[in-house]
Amino acid sequence: MSNKDYLKDISEIKNLMNKSSRFISLSGLSGIMAGIYALIGAAVTYYLVNTYSYGTLLLDGWIFRTVMLVLFLVALFSIVTGIFLTTRKAKKNGEKIWDASSRRLIFNFLIPLIAGGLYILIILAQGKYGQTGGLMLIFYGLALVSASKYSIGNIKYLGFIEIILGLIAAYYPGYGFYLWVLGFGVMHIIYGAIMHFKYDTK
């Protein structure tokens, strides 16, 4: 057996090991759709705040509740779309949607996300709105990095970008909204498009 044959066998073994330990059916289209939902949600939020808050720094009660509802709907639509498109891709690839790899991915993704969500709710209840956008980006980025070891490795780079944007938003809270739009909207669309053309179109 030649060296080329050995290298080919090693490469095939490595690919099999990666498939057994990583959930690789994440859909790039789901990232694109999540970014679009985020941009729509941001546009609605911007309109509400700038039309009805009358330039005040603190959000009025009904405006705050409406903005929270918009964020919830953005997250809900993103999750439902992600599950649908990822399930469809997994079936197409002949992979199980719920196995040890996907369970590890979800578990590692949810720990920082839930912790961050609870922390954000606590500071919102205290009327501290300024750091919300930055904290969302940071905890979401940490969740992506935490889950990346059980999925396609490229997702960690999106996580790093989200963390950096979150730290910038923390330092410049006045730009938190625009950095949120950049992180959850634009970066999701860019990342989803890259993933789609790199993995989904093969």
Image (cartoon, rainbow, N blue to C red):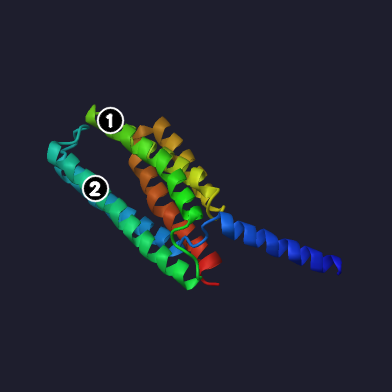
- The circle drawn on residue 182 is none
* Relative side of 125 to 156, left or right: left
Quarter of the picture holding the N terminus:
bottom right
In the rendered image, is residue 11 in sight? yes
- Which residue is under mark 1? 122
Q: Earlier in the sequence, mark 2 or mark 1?
A: 2
With respect to residue 37, does 127 lie above or below?
above
Which amino acid is tagged 1?
Answer: Ile
| Rendered residue at 41%/54% (across/down) | 186
Label 1, residues with CA under 10 Å away: few <14, some 14-19, many ≥20: few
Residue 130, quarter of the rendered image: top left
Q: Secondary structure at mark 2?
A: helix
Residue 197's spot in the image, x, y percent? 52, 67
Cβ atoms under marks 2 and 1 closer than 8 Å: no
Label 2, residues with CA under 10 Å away: few <14, some 14-19, many ≥20: many
Q: Name, please, the residue furthest toward the front.
A: 100
Residue 80, quarter of the rendered image: bottom left
Which amino acid is tagged 2?
Answer: Thr
Residue 194's spot in the image, x, y percent? 51, 61
In the rendered image, is residue 50 in sight? no
Q: Name, please, the residue furthest toward the top.
A: 126
Residue 96's spot in the image, x, y percent? 47, 64
| Rendered residue at 36%/57% (across/down) | 34
Residue 71's spot in the image, x, y percent? 27, 47
- The circle drawn on residue 45 is 2
| Rendered residue at 20%/43% (across/down) | 49
* Relative side of 122 to 138, left or right: left
With respect to residue 58, does 142 lie above or below?
below
* Relative side of 120 to 27, left or right: left
Looking at the image, which is closer to me, 128 or 55?
A: 128
What is the tally of numbered marks visible in this picture? 2
